[in-house]
Image: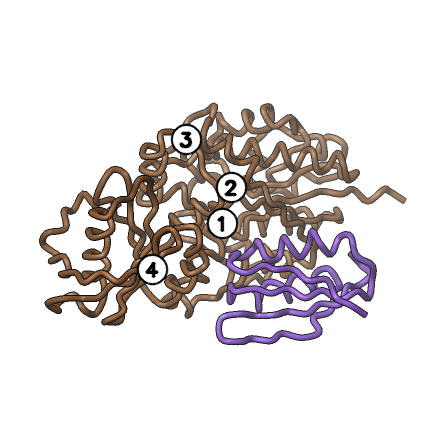
Amino acid sequence: MSSVFIDARNLLCPMPVIRTQDRVAGLQPGELVEVLCTDPGVVYDIPAWCRMRGHEVCNIEEQEYEITITIRVGDKG
Amino acid sequence: MMQQRKAVALISGGLDSLLAARVVMEQGVHVEGINFFTGFCVEGHTHAIRKKERTRPQRNNALWSAEQLGIKLHLVDIIDEYKDVVINPKHGYGANLNPCLDCKIFMVNKARAWIEANGFDFIITGEVIGQRPMSQRKDTMPVVARDSGAEDRLVRPLCARNLPPTLPEKEGWLDRDRLYAFNGRSRKPQMALAKQFGFEDYAQPAGGCCFLTDKQYSVKLSDLWSTRGKRDYDLDDIMLLKVGRHLRPRPNFKIIVGREEGENRFMEGYRKRFTHMISSSHTGPLVLLDGEDINRDDLALAARLTARFGQGRDAGLVTVEVHDKGVMQNMEVVPMPTEQIPADWYL
């Protein structure tokens, strides 16, 4: 399954979470979303938001200055 | 069986809104949270950028609060709409460029529209009479309820017993006797209630949760408005006011000097938008130039300042890489001695 990509680089929290929230609202359960970020706060905030909304964090990949978080959309919205 | 009522709580990430939501949840109401992002929220921003702040939790406190409460949180970007609140506050500013009363009215009004669109019954805020000098006074509480259009659907559970009964109390959705009568600036009642509910490690931001209450930030925003000749901003403007040292050596431009690695890295994202420079002969900060009609003399001055804030500050000559209008050139400059930098250049 192809994934939806969100470029949230140079955005500071909570903007990456808001971009993710707004994009996920139009997706179906099971779809994958990749969020590319530079704010280190996302490794706390996006998983917290996912727990709250019933989405699954599949992977967090941290490179030197960039973080990619992969989410599987849940069915609770 | 009685219908379960639904309320939305304005969640800032601070203790009061956390408690207010919990007090209402205790009475069997379904509560969801809403958090409005204005762009000026202290939340997350410089904490995430600056390395020296890394010992603090980088979490978003509104998300943390909602998790503690076990409720759904709706994060809403209001950056564009909020401009009018900042630029034209009907009720004026506080000590700095903080339009606290207009801000509260605006947010409660947004929450009112949200409950109407989502079939919720009322709004909860963590306001306490006397807690804040501008927006949380006995005489301004009714103004917020009236001007937001929320009227008696706005419940302040922490000080409700000091205020007239609201619709949820009159209708029996909430038991007034189980609401509170907090008053004044003391935080002790809230801390005692937090203990009772088992909340620990909650955010206690010194100086509030908004950059507009900060004197230095307000000075920089005023400078931005006055030098551009109009009271306007975009998100990048207000983000950059939170980062680096800002010096205005000439009316037509200012420089933004990264103070550490985290800020330099954040500012790198703005290199395409701004003329920028960095020392290539010595370790030093990234410097952005924000202004108009920047000529070669301005660039030379900025390069001397760039050299001053780097490791070459005591060197005879420093090479500064200058990127202007898509062209890179090296400038050999003498670092500007600290004592020659007028204090009023610093914003």
> Label for residue B328?
4
The chain to which mark 2 is attached is B
The chain to which mark 1 is attached is B
Q: Considering only vertical position in the picture, is B144 above or below B158?
A: above
Name the residue tied to disc 2. Answer: B182
Name the residue tied to disc 1. Answer: B189
Residue B72 falls left or right of residue A31: left
Question: Where in the figure is residue A32, as x and y percent of width and height?
Answer: 75, 66
Please determine if labels 4 and 1 lie on a single subunit: yes
Q: What hue represents chain A? A: purple
Badge 4 vs badge 1, beta-carbon distance below 8 Å: no
Of helix, strand and loop, which one carries label 2? loop
For badge 4, the amino acid type reads Met
Residue B151 falls left or right of residue B209: right
Badge 1 vs badge 2, beta-carbon distance below 8 Å: yes
For badge 3, the amino acid type reads Arg
Query: Circle 3: is it few (<14), some (14-19), or many (20+) Cα within 10 Å?
Result: some
Which tag, 1 or 2, sits closer to the chain's start? 2
Estimate the spatial distance between the alpha carbons at disc 1 and disc 3, rounded to whole Å: 41 Å
Of helix, strand and loop, which one carries label 1? helix
Callout in the foreground (3, 4): 4
The chain to which mark 4 is attached is B
For badge 2, the amino acid type reads Phe
Question: Where in the figure is residue B196, as x and y percent of width and height?
Answer: 58, 58
Q: Please tell me which residue is depicted at 41% across the width and 36% down the height of the picture.
A: B98
The mark total stands at 4
Estimate the spatial distance between the alpha carbons at disc 1 and disc 2, rounded to whole Å: 7 Å
Estimate the spatial distance between the alpha carbons at disc 4 and disc 1, rounded to whole Å: 60 Å
Q: Please tell me which residue is depicted at 69% across the width and 33% down the height of the picture.
A: B113
Which tag, 1 or 3, sits closer to the chain's start? 1
Please determine if labels 1 and 3 lie on a single subunit: yes
> Label for residue B231?
3
